[in-house]
Image (cartoon, grey):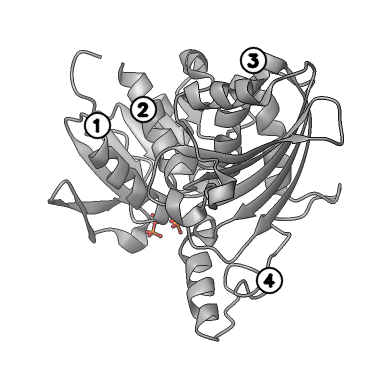
């Protein structure tokens, strides 16, 4: 593209949508015109971007009649289901943060550090992976290349910001002693809920199946054995993950550490004797994936344990989507 793109932000009033704006501003994303879109409820309200106020428009079937090159969507699955194809039919490239299109074989699922080439076969929609999957992929990629991953066990500790405003309010109120259950079936303050998204007939939650299926799609390898337990914890920002990996080939811990430290987007934070390891509060507001507690799993032949933390709204959603948009205009 030899001019600056016209950009639409769909869901501009939401938790992820407003972070799209922050990240576009932080990374000085080039644009000619930018349009803010949300539901009828927000039409006419304003959002501030780069010091300027923008009026929010209602998303309609005609929203993409004007020339728009890239649309960043984070307005829920049903909105993406209806409007992403309309946008794509108008020549817009949609980067969609919902789970609606992720497993569609016609839609690339992209983490820019991991599988950037996949954006080339997009047909107008590119899916942004699940927040928990994104941070895991950045870490798994260099290790899969070097040692071939045989099996992965994910155990997640996920922040309430992943549930939008309702999740944040449930925890805020809960901490004041008011048990609010707008986002979850149980109080989140003082609890760990082994329940993210709905339960399926196989006993897993949708969130767990997203991590399993998206891992295969992004790494382009269905032979990796993957299992997951995803847990909502009383933390506002950043998802933490315990990742247990079994490799096909032997490894040296120092080489693993180096492979991780050398990979773009990863910061190794690993000095446990001095109480230094990745922490949710320190990862909040950052774009990198933080890895620590790097240690051998002595219970299997070529096993390792990692503790992986990232801001779920930034790298887990908005930053990853903006990085995809950056690849599109490259
Ligand atoms: P609105 O604020 O007008 O409801 P969150 O995930 O933080 O709750 O944010 C969801 C975002 O998606 C909001 O910006 C919300 O707009 C937007 N949204 C929800 N439903 C629709 C819809 N049907 N059409 C357009 N935007 C929608």
Q: Earlier in the sequence, mark 4 or mark 2?
A: 4
How far apart marks 4 and 2 lie (CA) works out to 36 Å
Categorize mark 1 by other alpha carbons within 10 Å: few (<14), some (14-19), many (20+): some
Give the quarter of the figure containing the N terminus. Answer: top left
Categorize mark 3 by other alpha carbons within 10 Å: few (<14), some (14-19), many (20+): few
**Element marked by disc 3:** helix
The mark closer to the camera, 1 or 3, is: 3
- Residue 105 seen: no
How far apart marks 4 and 3 lie (CA) works out to 41 Å
Taking depth in this image into account, of 272 and 193 the one nearest to the observer is 272
**Element marked by disc 2:** helix
Q: Are marks 1 and 4 in contact (CB under 8 Å)?
A: no
Q: Earlier in the sequence, mark 3 or mark 2?
A: 3
Q: Earlier in the sequence, mark 4 or mark 3?
A: 3
Give the quarter of the figure containing the C terminus. Answer: top left
Q: Say whether mark 2 is within 8 Å of ligand 1.
A: no
How far apart marks 1 and 4 lie (CA) works out to 39 Å
How far apart marks 3 and 2 lie (CA) works out to 26 Å
**Which residue is depicted at the point 55% across and 85% down?**
178
- Regarding ligand 1, which quadrant of the image does it lie in? bottom left
What residue would you read off at disc 2? 325
Q: Earlier in the sequence, mark 1 or mark 4?
A: 1
Residue 222 position, x and y percent, is 76, 21
Residue 71's quadrant in the figure?
top left
How far apart marks 1 and 3 lie (CA) works out to 31 Å
| Labelled disc at residue 29 | 1
């Amino acid at each position: 593209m030899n001019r600056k793109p016209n950009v639409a932000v769909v869901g501009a009033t939401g938790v992820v949508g407003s972070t799209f704006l922050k990240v576009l501003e932080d990374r000085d994303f080039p644009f000619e015109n930018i349009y803010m879109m949300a539901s009828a409820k927000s039409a006419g309200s304003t959002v501030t971007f780069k010091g300027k106020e923008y009026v929010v428009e209602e998303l309609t079937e005609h929203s993409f009649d004007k020339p728009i090159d890239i649309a960043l969507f984070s307005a829920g699955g049903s909105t993406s289901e209806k409007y992403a194809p309309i946008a794509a039919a108008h020549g817009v490239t949609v980067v969609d943060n919902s789970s609606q299109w992720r497993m569609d074989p016609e839609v690339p699922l992209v983490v820019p550090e991991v599988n950037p080439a996949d954006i080339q076969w997009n047909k107008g929609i590119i899916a942004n992976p699940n927040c928990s999957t994104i941070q895991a992929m950045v870490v798994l990629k260099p290790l899969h290349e070097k040692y071939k991953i045989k099996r992965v066990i994910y155990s997640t500790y996920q922040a309430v910001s992943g549930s939008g405003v309702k999740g944040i309010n449930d925890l805020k109120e809960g901490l004041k002693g008011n048990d609010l259950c707008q986002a979850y079936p149980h109080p989140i303050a003082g609890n760990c809920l082994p329940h993210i998204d709905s339960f399926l007939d196989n006993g897993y939650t949708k969130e767990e199946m997203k991590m399993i299926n998206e891992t295969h799609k992004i790494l382009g390898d269905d032979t990796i054995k993957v299992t997951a337990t995803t847990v909502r914890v009383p933390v506002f920002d950043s998802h933490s993950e315990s990742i247990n990996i079994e490799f096909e080939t032997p490894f040296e811990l120092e080489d693993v550490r180096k492979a991780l430290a050398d990979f773009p987007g990863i910061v190794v934070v690993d000095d446990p004797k001095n109480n230094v390891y990745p922490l949710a509060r320190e990862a909040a507001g950052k774009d990198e994936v933080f890895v620590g507690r790097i240690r051998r799993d002595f219970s299997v032949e070529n096993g390792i344990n990692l503790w992986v933390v990232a801001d779920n709204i930034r790298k887990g959603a908005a930053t990853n989507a903006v990085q995809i948009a950056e690849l599109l205009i490259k």
